[in-house]
Amino acid sequence: EKGTYPHFMLKEIDEQPPVIRRIIQEYQDDHDNIKLDPEVRQAMRDTDRVYIIAAGTSYHAGLVGKQFMEKLANVPVEVHIASEFSYNMPLLSEKPLFVFISQSGETADSRSVLVRIKELGHPALTITNVPGSTLSREANYTLHLHAGPEIAVASTKAYTAQIAVLAILAVDTAKAKGLDLDFDPLQELGIVASVMESLTDQKDEFEMLAKELFAETRNAFFIGRGMDYYVVQEAALKLKEISYIQAEGFAGGELKHGTIALIEDGTPVIAINTQANVNLSIRGNVQEVAARGAKTCVVSLEGLEKDTDSFVVPQVHELLTPLVSVVPMQLLAYYAALHRDCDVDKPRNLAKSVTVE
Ligand code: F6R
């Protein structure tokens, strides 16, 4: 039930801090260590390459998950859009492990890949919000997101739950392989939950920003580099699916290779800036579009901010920034849709679970 909320989407955005806290609880043992199905642990140890298969928002979570697994656990990862995989199957490694990420667990595109790889005899792990779902039943192993039912068509709390579980899985794998890490994901996720709360407490700010940026526009661009590039792809998807504004997320450095031609007077360009190593380059990109008339908005991580930035997100561990930088993007999309009188929870032409290929 929506309770006092006008829309499920807003309620689900607000549920993100408690969901992260529930994940911490569910994946923690009595000694504050990670608690995980030993079979999943073994499968992650045994594989020489993980193939993440997903669609839409879950695919965007997979892109972040790849960074965790490669940077923390030294496991090579490929991330594939489910609908492309079957027809365009890459050469597989010797011991592949397939990881299906799906809120609903019912996405037909992902299921057809699962059927195919089972025929080939490869193991599969499903990360889902619905444990009894098709993708969960048909895979060898399941990790549960514990996000509670997600009703709004636009996915919000499932995305952050997926990223949190992927971080825990990556660290667990690193530990199982005997790698030395000074990163405690459970503790860091606790900080993330508090920061998320401080963001959802500032809705008025995002409502104002959304009005400034999106009231009249027909299109909008999101830019970022590194981790932020994955989040801007999700930001653009959120905005387009509920507000019908044509939106794209680009790698900052790619702008000059074509997209910058689209910038006109007043085109909104939103930059996410949470990664110290690309701070200067992304700021350069913002200047380039501003010089061509773009209406710019920079969302920075604390420590990288400048006075002219539109919003500063309090600090979290730099690997976990997508969990917090996405919240302003979800709220911007929500208010853009609200003020354009769109049906926020049930956007046209879309269904919550896509059970056709
Ligand atoms: C976007 C959205 C879709 C889903 C996609 C995959 O907000 O909801 O892009 O993420 O259809 O769905 P699941 O995760 O259920 O497989």
Image: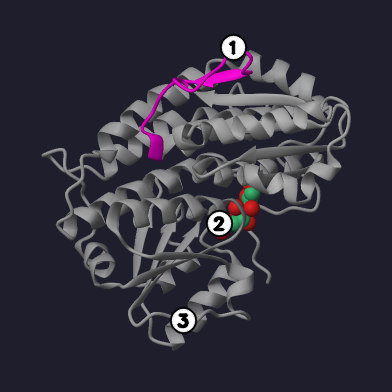
In magenta, the rendered stretch is 302-319
306 drawn magenta: yes
Q: Residue at x 43, y 88 (%)?
A: 120
Determine if the C-beta at disc 2 is less than 8 A from ligand 1: yes
Picture layout, residue 162 above or below residue 305: below
Residue 1 visible in rendering: no
Q: Quadrant of the image for the C terminus?
A: bottom right
**Badge 2: few (under 14), some or many (20 or more) residues near its Cα, within 10 Å?**
many
Q: Nearer the viewer, residue 58 or 63?
A: 63
Label 2 secondary element = helix
Amino acid type at circle 2 is Tyr
Separation of residues labelled 2 and 3 (CA atoms): 18 Å
- At label 1, the amino acid type is Asp
Residue at x 51%, y 37% (from the top left corner):
278
Q: CA distance from mark 1 to mark 3?
A: 52 Å
Please name which of the two marks, 1 or 2, marks the residue nearer to the observer: 1
175 left or right of 342 in image: left
Crowding near the residue tagged with mark 3, few <14, some 14–19, many ≥20 C-alpha atoms within 10 Å = some
Q: Nearer the viewer, residue 149 or 27?
A: 27
